[in-house]
Image: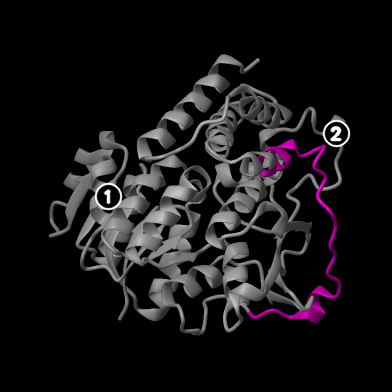
């Protein structure tokens, strides 16, 4: 029985990971959530982990009181997340938190030699060089959980990495595919949260609407698979059936297909290299009938263009793009800025700062803080 320590257990990825755990009777050794005390308590009582962590320390006393009749240790804050990241009882560490909070636990898990199932985009977007260098030094495998990166990882199995020509990252296009900037000027929060294929958290869903999510995945792919930016092609695929593909030197293209259900890549990361029945439905190509592909609109969706520019320029620019986006999305969700302002702020932040190299965790956090401060100063 494989043992799993899980950060972000009450979110979209976390709850689906626990569905996989139920299906395959995985041993959950630790659970962590941001602030969903009631849901975390329910999960703790069902899975009986050794410890749980509530990141928002204001909820620590409440959670501790709720679990007082159990032997489960209650942790809080970043210290709690990092303790879980290096938990010796866990065979694998699943990081599915949203935001920069995921970077330090990832680095901590690597230093502890813990295999990682990674669903936290910001870890690689902001600190890709640090993370991959540390993973290589400690011989720690990182299994991608994103459906696109999982697809690429699967398409690389059994083939020589040196014969790879490029990868093809597919994108759903979000709810606003085909729209012009003029048509997006008055987009509501509800419209932006209405994704056509995937059920995700609010921040990630907004990122999908702006195509920032695909920009972040572009940057992730560069680090995960040791690629140059010109080896990554983005293709809009509305049906979300082809999750991504790999092209080899002979121009053979190998793709991974499946229904748009995150439990498939989550399970592959947790059970790798085994393939087991998954709690989802099988793919019927005849039910879909037609699969379509198109080029992304980099002019309308400037977040994607900015991310490609940021990773091409290197240094701290991907971290700046990510930090600016997190801040801007929070303001959009609060109803304080219009939809198109998100991309404008991200592009402005990347253009504003001089080149900076990131040599340590503190450098990453400083660049992130500067990007967020820039957004706060330039909201209107």
Q: Residue at x 42, y 48 (%)?
A: 130
Cα distance in 3D space between marks 1 and 2: 44 Å
Measured as percent of width and height from the top left, residue 36 is found at 37, 45
Question: Which corner quadrant of the image does residue 320 belong to?
Answer: top right
Q: Secondary structure at mark 1?
A: helix
Q: Secondary structure at mark 2?
A: helix
Q: Residue at x 64, y 57 (%)?
A: 198
- Residue count near mark 2 (Cα–Cα under 10 Å), binned few <14, some 14–19, many ≥20: few
- Residue count near mark 1 (Cα–Cα under 10 Å), binned few <14, some 14–19, many ≥20: many
Instruction: Answer with left or right where residue 299 lies relative to residue 130.
Output: right
Please tell me whether residue 300 belongs to the stretch shown in magenta: yes
Q: Is residue 379 above or below residue 122?
A: above
Q: Residue at x 45, y 38 (%)?
A: 358
Name the disc covering residue 314, or none: none
Q: Is residue 286 above or below residue 131?
A: below
Q: Is residue 337 above or below residue 247?
A: above
Query: To which residue does mark 2 refer?
Result: 183
Please tell me whether residue 22 belongs to the stretch shown in magenta: no
Magenta segment? 282-308
Of marks 1 and 2, the one in the foreground:
1
Measured as percent of width and height from the top left, residue 15 is found at 44, 60
Depth check: give the residue in front, 192 or 293. Answer: 293
Quadrant location, the C terminus: top right
Instruction: Answer with left or right where residue 53 lies relative to residue 374.
Output: left
The way the protein has been coloured in the rendering is: one colour
Measured as percent of width and height from the top left, residue 346 is found at 64, 30
Quadrant location, the N terminus: bottom left
Measured as percent of width and height from the top left, residue 367 is found at 47, 30
Name the disc covering residue 82, or none: 1
């Amino acid at each position: 029985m494989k043992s799993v320590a899980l950060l972000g257990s009450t979110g979209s990825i976390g709850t689906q990971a626990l569905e996989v755990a139920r299906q395959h009777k995985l041993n959950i050794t630790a659970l962590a959530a941001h602030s969903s005390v009631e849901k975390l308590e329910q999960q703790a009582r069902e899975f009986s982990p050794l410890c749980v962590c509530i990141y928002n320390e204001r909820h620590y006393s409440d959670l501790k009181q709720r679990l007082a009749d159990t032997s489960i240790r209650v942790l809080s804050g970043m210290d709690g997340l990092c303790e879980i990241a290096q938990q010796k009882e866990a065979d694998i560490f699943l990081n599915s938190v949203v935001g920069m909070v995921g970077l330090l636990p990832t680095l901590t898990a690597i230093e502890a030699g813990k295999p990682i199932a990674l669903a936290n985009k910001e870890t690689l977007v902001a600190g890709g060089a640090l993370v991959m260098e540390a993973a290589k030094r400690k011989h720690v495998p990182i299994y991608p959980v994103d459906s696109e990166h999982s697809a690429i990882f699967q398409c690389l199995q059994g083939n020589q990495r040196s014969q790879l020509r490029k990868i093809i990252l597919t994108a759903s296009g979000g709810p606003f595919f085909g729209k012009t900037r003029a048509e997006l000027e008055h987009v509501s929060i509800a419209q932006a949260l209405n994704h056509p294929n995937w059920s995700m958290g609010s921040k990630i869903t907004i990122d999908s609407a702006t195509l920032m999510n695909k920009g972040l995945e572009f940057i992730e792919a560069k680090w995960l698979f040791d690629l140059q930016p010109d080896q990554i092609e983005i293709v809009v695929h509305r049906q979300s059936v082809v999750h991504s593909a790999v092209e080899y030197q002979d121009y053979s293209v190998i793709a991974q297909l499946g229904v748009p259900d995150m439990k498939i890549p989550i399970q592959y990361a947790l059970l790798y290299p085994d393939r087991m029945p998954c709690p989802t439905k099988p793919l019927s190509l005849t039910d879909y009938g037609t699969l379509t592909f198109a080029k992304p609109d980099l002019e309308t969706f400037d977040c994607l263009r900015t991310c490609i520019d940021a990773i091409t320029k290197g240094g701290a620019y991907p971290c700046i793009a990510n930090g600016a986006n997190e801040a801007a999305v929070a303001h959009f969700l609060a109803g304080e800025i219009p939809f198109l302002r998100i991309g404008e702020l991200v592009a402005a932040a990347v253009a504003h700062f001089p080149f900076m190299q990131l040599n340590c965790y503190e450098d990453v956090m400083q660049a992130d803080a500067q990007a967020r401060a820039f957004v706060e100063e330039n909201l209107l």
